[in-house]
Every structure is written in C-alpha cells, then in structure tokens.
Image: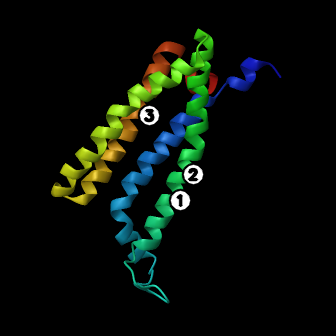
Amino acid sequence: MSASRILTGRSLFVFVGGGCYGLVALAVPFTPEIGAAFGLPGTVPLVGDLSPAFVPLVACNALLGVADSVREPASMALFADEGTDDGSVASSFGIRELVWRPGSVAAPMLGGVLMDVGMQWVFFVGAAAAFSGVLTFLGVLSRNYGVDALTQW
C-alpha cells in the first residue's frame, strides 16, 4: 500500500469529530427534557435524588469522548504531516499550541460571562464555535484542494 493512500481521508475524521462535538454541545441544554421523555427516575438507589438529566448528561460526556477519539488522532496526524513536509515536526506542534492557547484562556472567561445570561448559552455558543470551526476547515480545504478534499487530504 502506498504512503499517499495511507494518508488520505484524515481530514474527514477531523470534520466528523468536530461536527459531533457541536451536536453534543447543542444537546446538553436539552438533557432534562430528554431524561423526562425517557421517563428516567429522579432517585437512584444508594445515590439518592438526581435530576432526570443525569443519565443523558453522562451519555453526552461519553459521546464527547467518542467524538474526541475520532478527531484527535487525525488532527495530530495532520499536524505531523504538515511538519514533516517542512522538515520540522516539532515546530508544527508548537504552532498548534500557539493557535489553541488563546481559546483555552478565553473560552472559560466567556463561559463565565454567558452563565450570567443562562447556562444553556454556554453550550449554544460552544456548539456554534464547533460548527464554525468545522465549516471553516471545510471551506479552506475545499478552496485549496477542491471538492473532494475531505476524502483526499
């Protein structure tokens, strides 16, 4: 199997994983209604009183783990590929860190402000950020590599 065949399609995993992040974030504010719709109990033996949203929230957390397992390896591989093309894998990860650092500082502060408006807005804005990220990723790939970029790159 040729090396180019092994490397194709990583961007599809980044796109799908990022989209799943957005969908799960969008679902979180509705977990009380989801729990109620499934008739989940408000009391669990040996634990006590819980919201019917508890089990759907645990499920959402598990789905975020699945989304991360789809996205993260492909994302890291794309950074490594980009660094290998330039002859410096370590510098590509340094650039990744520089790009992510502002978001890791600003997002919790924005979340705190949004909590004053309503806790659900933290998740709505998070979902919007995930969707805008994957759509930007798709747009850049499509512009630079054509309509088949998700399966070819």
Residue holding disc 1: 62
**Mark 1 residue element:** helix
Q: Residue furthest right?
A: 1
Q: Do the numbered discs 1 and 2 sit on residues whose CB atoms are within 8 Å?
A: yes
**Mark 3 residue element:** helix
State the residue at coordinates (31%, 39%): 105
State the residue at coordinates (29%, 47%): 108
Q: Position of residue 84 (x, y in %)?
A: 63, 15
What amino acid is found at the position of numbered circle 2 in the picture? Val
Residue holding disc 2: 66
Mark sitting earlier along the chain (1/3): 1
Res 104 quadrant in image: top left
Placement of the N terminus among the 4 image quadrants: top right
Q: Do the numbered discs 1 and 3 sit on residues whose CB atoms are within 8 Å?
A: no
Placement of the C terminus among the 4 image quadrants: top right
Q: Position of residue 66 (x, y in %)?
A: 57, 51
Q: Vertically, is 87 above or below 13?
A: above
What amino acid is found at the position of numbered circle 3 in the picture? Val
Q: Residue furthest bottom?
A: 45
Question: Of circles 2 and 3, which is in front?
Answer: 2
Res 128 quadrant in image: top left
What's the mark number on residue 134? Answer: 3
